[in-house]
Image (cartoon, helix red, strand yellow):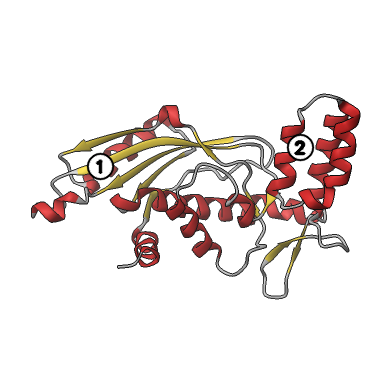
Amino acid sequence: MEINEKIKYAIEKTEILKQPKKLLSTYESTTVHYYILTVPFYLEFEGKNPDSETVIREGRITWQKPQLITPSYILRMEGFSEEAKKAFRMLAGENADLALMLYKLKFVKDYDKMDIISTPIAEIARKINEEIEKSQDPFTAVIKGVDEFWDVSLTKFIYDLAVSSAYFSQLPELSRNKLIDISSSGLTFLSKDNQGIPIAAKIEIEKLFGLYEKGEIEAKILKEELDSWGLFDYYQDRFFNLFKKRR
């Protein structure tokens, strides 16, 4: 099986056993606590019952304060394996400009941990669900994934949560603010100026230029934002002129 087929298989086999009770916030950072449950891939080779062991991966994902960006912006961000990036491309499909509310997605590595337990997935999921209900944590998810491509399963969850949050929570407000347009087929796209630059990008970039001019941020932060949108060439003269003034 080729790598793309394996990724598709992992996406198709991913099940969200418990969704967070709340969607991603429009106005502030959101941290989601996740559990990914998988059957160890080696059980098949050892001829053991798939219910004999379960791998539990636990961690947190943090979305910084959201801004309107696209899947291509996400793929420039750090934190994804190449397989996970391919999975995101597959999920985004051909709508490369589909508007999503994701910004500087990152994994908080110091909380990641993994255990292998001699208990079936269904039983572990039930116990975790009971703990979540007791704690009443609205930002916890339980995901059943594929062991070799567990971060692809995580990517599937990330994508689904982001899209749900965008369409049911964040996009209506952005539409009122003229930052997005909706096509006749119902797809959501970034509103652009007559030069094809997303309005949301221009707003954020102008804000960062202002902060850089005041000396409140370093040039690196502005440069990274321009690169993330693929707009450095467009703004490079202004960037270098301001850089020379600041030296």
Residue 186, picture quadrant: bottom right
Is 247 left, or right, of 119 in this rendering?
right
User: Which amino acid, mark 2?
Assistant: Leu
Residue 9: x and y, percent? 34, 64
Query: Where's the C terminus, which quadrant?
Result: top right
Residue 14: x and y, percent? 36, 57
Label 1, label 2: how many angstroms apart (C-alpha)? Answer: 41 Å
Q: Quick one: SS at disc 2? A: helix
Residue 240: x and y, percent? 85, 39
Query: Where's the N terminus, which quadrant?
Result: bottom left
User: Which amino acid, mark 1?
Assistant: Val
Q: How many marks?
A: 2
Q: Quick one: SS at disc 1? A: strand
Q: Circle 2 sits on which residue?
A: 222
Q: Which mark is residue 55?
A: 1
Callout 1 crowding tier (Cα within 10 Å): few <14, some 14–19, many ≥20 = many
- Please tell me which residue is depicted at 48% across the width and 46% down the height of the picture: 80
Q: Earlier in the sequence, mark 1 or mark 2?
A: 1
Callout 2 crowding tier (Cα within 10 Å): few <14, some 14–19, many ≥20 = many
Q: Nearer the viewer, mark 1 or mark 2?
A: 2
Is 75 left, or right, of 50 in this rendering?
right
Q: Foreground residue, 222 or 31?
A: 222
Up/down of 195 relative to 63, above or below: below
